[in-house]
Image (cartoon, rainbow, N blue to C red):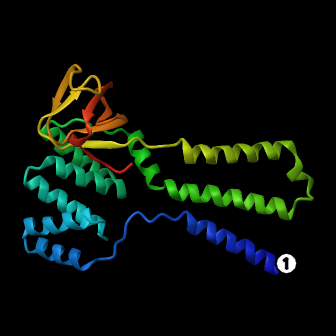
Amino acid sequence: MQNYLSKICLFFFASFLCFLQPVYSQKFTNSLTEADSLYNQKEYLKSLAIYKEILKNGQEYSPQMLLKMAYIEEALRHYDQSMYYLSLYYHLHPNRAVLRKMEEVAHTQGLKGYEYSDLDFFRTQFRKYYMNILELLLIGAVGVVTVMVLKRKQAFFRQPAFRLLFLLYLGFILYYINLLTFRQQGITHKQQAALMSGPAAGSQWLATLTKGNRLTITGENDIWFEVKWQGERAYIRKKNLLLLPE
């Protein structure tokens, strides 16, 4: 019996490890240490170049690096890049201070797509803990199945009501994994980015966007992204958007 329980515990542990998805690492690399040193010495352009290389190569970095990059880009008046790095930071650490900063810059520069409600804040918080919630749901399902196997002779586990509830629980997990998705967003990084009514150059022109506007992507068609603009469907060339994490 003890050996059997040990196997169950091992299964729980293995299941938990399988669904752990670390978002980033805070381990400082030599490149990051060098860039931080240059930043502290006010060698901002040199530090920014190293920061960009770290991000491009997918190396280990700290979230504070993104804030420093946003600060430097804002000072250079590269608002599309500044908002991009602030959005990346917010994806890792949703907090209202970053929201207020983005709204302030957007208001000052006349940028669209940065309006937030309490519901939007809740969604970003929920997205942050998406994998943790999934892990708990799966562990709960494994736990119930384990108890059902060990106590299979008990009448409670053979009742239709219990089986129905458990099937609904499994159905919710499937919905959570496959259907509960977050729409991707992108930031315009071309000075004259045209919004069209259809996925073709000959479609009706709707608007011309400057750098730094944020759009919600609802689909794609060849070289075009379908986006939401002022409550309506529009299209923009893929090359004109910096994509944010989902």
Q: Is residue 46 above or below residue 78?
A: below
- Quarter of the image where the N terminus is located: bottom right
Residue drawn at (41%, 63%), measured in percent from left and top?
23
- Examine the image and state in which quarter residue 233 appears: top left
Image position of 219 (left or right of 4) = left
Give the total number of marks visible in the rendering. 1
Q: Nearer the viewer, residue 42 or 202?
A: 202
Q: Is residue 232 above or below residue 5?
A: above
Look at the image and tell me whether residue 29 can be seen. Answer: yes
Q: Nearer the viewer, residue 235 or 168?
A: 235
Circle 1 is placed at which residue position?
Answer: 1
Image position of 73 (left or right of 135) = left
Determine crowd level at label 1: few under 14, some 14-19, many 20+ residues with C-alpha closer than 10 A.
Answer: few
Image position of 166 (left or right of 204) = right
Look at the image and tell me whether residue 115 can be seen. Answer: no
Q: Is residue 160 above or below residue 221?
A: below
Residue sitting farthest toward the top: 204
Residue drawn at (28%, 37%), measured in percent from left and top?
223
Question: What is the x, y in percent for residue 209?
Answer: 16, 33
- Examine the image and state in which quarter residue 133 appears: bottom right
Q: What is the three-letter code of the residue carrying label 1? A: Met
Q: Nearer the viewer, residue 144 or 211?
A: 211
Question: What is the x, y in percent for residue 121?
Answer: 39, 45
Residue drawn at (19%, 22%), measured in percent from left and top?
205
- Examine the image and state in which quarter residue 219 appears: top left
Question: What is the x, y in percent for residue 140?
Answer: 68, 58
Q: Is residue 53 above or below residue 82?
A: below
Question: What is the x, y in percent for residue 187?
Answer: 24, 43
Residue drawn at (78%, 42%), measured in percent from left and top?
164
Q: Secondary structure at mark 1?
A: loop
Image position of 70 (left or right of 177) = left
